Amino acid sequence: MSEATPLYKRVLLKASGEALMGEQGFGIDVTVADRIASDIAEARALGVEVGVVVGGGNIFRGVAVASRGGDRVSGDHMGMLGTVINALALATSLRKIGLDCEVLSAISMPEICQSFSQRLALHHLGRGKVVIFAGGTGNPFFTTDSAAALRAAEIGAEAILKGTQVDGIYSADPKKDPHATRYETLTHDEVLQKGLAVMDVAAVALARENSIPIIVFSIHEQGAFARIVTGGGRATIVNDR
Ligand SMILES: Nc1ncnc2c1ncn2[C@@H]1O[C@H](COP(=O)(O)OP(=O)(O)O)[C@@H](O)[C@H]1O
Ligand SMILES: O=c1ccn([C@@H]2O[C@H](COP(=O)(O)OP(=O)(O)O)[C@@H](O)[C@H]2O)c(=O)[nH]1
């Protein structure tokens, strides 16, 4: 690994739930969780404090229930519980390689993990622990992208690194439009005005209000997380400055 100096003291990684299922159609591929853990370890070795919001799309999405005529709120509760399962899997992968971490959940389940509070999160981060934020925002009708923007603001993260299925923000969804072109940089306003759906509107707006840059990169590319915290790597940077 390079001796590069990190650009940030503290970042928030949004780890895609869907990425965690790897080639499987559902659930968690432990090899993917282990790889994401080793990427986080590289950033920690550079001295960067890391908070992680995990998605849940590999397990459950509330909108899927609603689209079949079911109850959206119950569906979202199931989705949030899915993020807790993912958080526990990622914590296991981190501990396996000797990284100290804590899972803090927006929904209290004290037998399983600690409950989220800003104070506790700052306490753990300040002691060098990776903090995994589970349970999204704790509210239905939100997404884990919004949870990422919220937790980033609460912990004073200098950037949100959205590790997703694609390597940046495109003029249209690159999975649907083969002619979509990739942006190197954008402002928060441009993402919203152009309707670029890589992240939901609430999340981008919250990041904009708090002047937090968003960096979109492929979580499938090994080592990308550490490269980005040192100012390299392939990504789209959303920043207003
Ligand atoms: N303009 C766009 N640029 C890049 N990706 C886009 C765009 N519009 C839609 N997408 C899609 O958004 C997905 C990320 O959305 P999301 O549901 O938040 O995934 P996850 O949280 O699992 O990373 C990408 O994988 C991509 O297919
Ligand atoms: O604050 C939140 C975060 C998540 N969810 C639910 O949890 C699911 C999984 O989260 P998300 O879709 O954001 O996961 P990702 O796309 O990152 O895998 C969502 O579809 C919602 O049903 C929710 O209700 N509130």
Image (cartoon, rainbow, N blue to C red):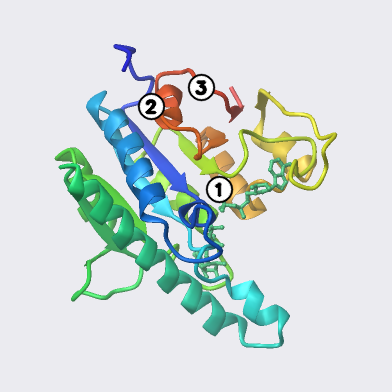
- Looking at this view, is 134 or 206 the one in front? 134
User: Is the residue under label 2 in contact with that under label 3 (CB below 8 Å)?
Assistant: no
Which residue corresponds to mark 2? 226
Q: Give how far across and how far down residue 166 sits, in percent.
A: 62, 39
Q: Residues within 10 Å of mark 1 (few under 14, many from 20)?
A: some
In this picture, residue 47 sits left or right of residue 133: left
Q: In which quarter of the image is the N terminus?
A: top left
- Give the numbered dot on residue 206: 1
Looking at the image, is mark 1 or mark 3 nearer the viewer? 3
- Give the numbered dot on residue 197: none
The mark nearer the N terminus, 1 or 3, is: 1
- Placement of 25 over or under 151, stated as above or below: below
Q: Give how far across and how far down residue 207 sits, in percent.
A: 54, 42
User: Is the residue under label 3 in contact with that under label 1 (CB below 8 Å)?
Assistant: no
Query: Residue 69 falls in which quadrant of the image?
Result: bottom right
Name the secondary structure under disc 2: helix
- Give the residue at x 33% y 13%: 2
- Looking at this view, is 55 or 25 the one in front? 25
- Looking at this view, is 122 or 60 the one in front? 60
Name the secondary structure under disc 1: helix
Which residue corresponds to mark 3? 233
Query: Residue 204 falls in which quadrant of the image?
Result: top right
Label count reads 3
- Give the residue at x 61% y 47%: 205
The mark nearer the N terminus, 2 or 1, is: 1
Q: How crowded is mark 2: few (under 14 residues within 10 Å), some or many (20 or more)?
A: many
Q: In which quarter of the image is the C terminus?
A: top right
Return the residue found at the far bottom: 70
Looking at the image, is mark 2 or mark 1 nearer the viewer? 2
Residue type marked 2: Ala
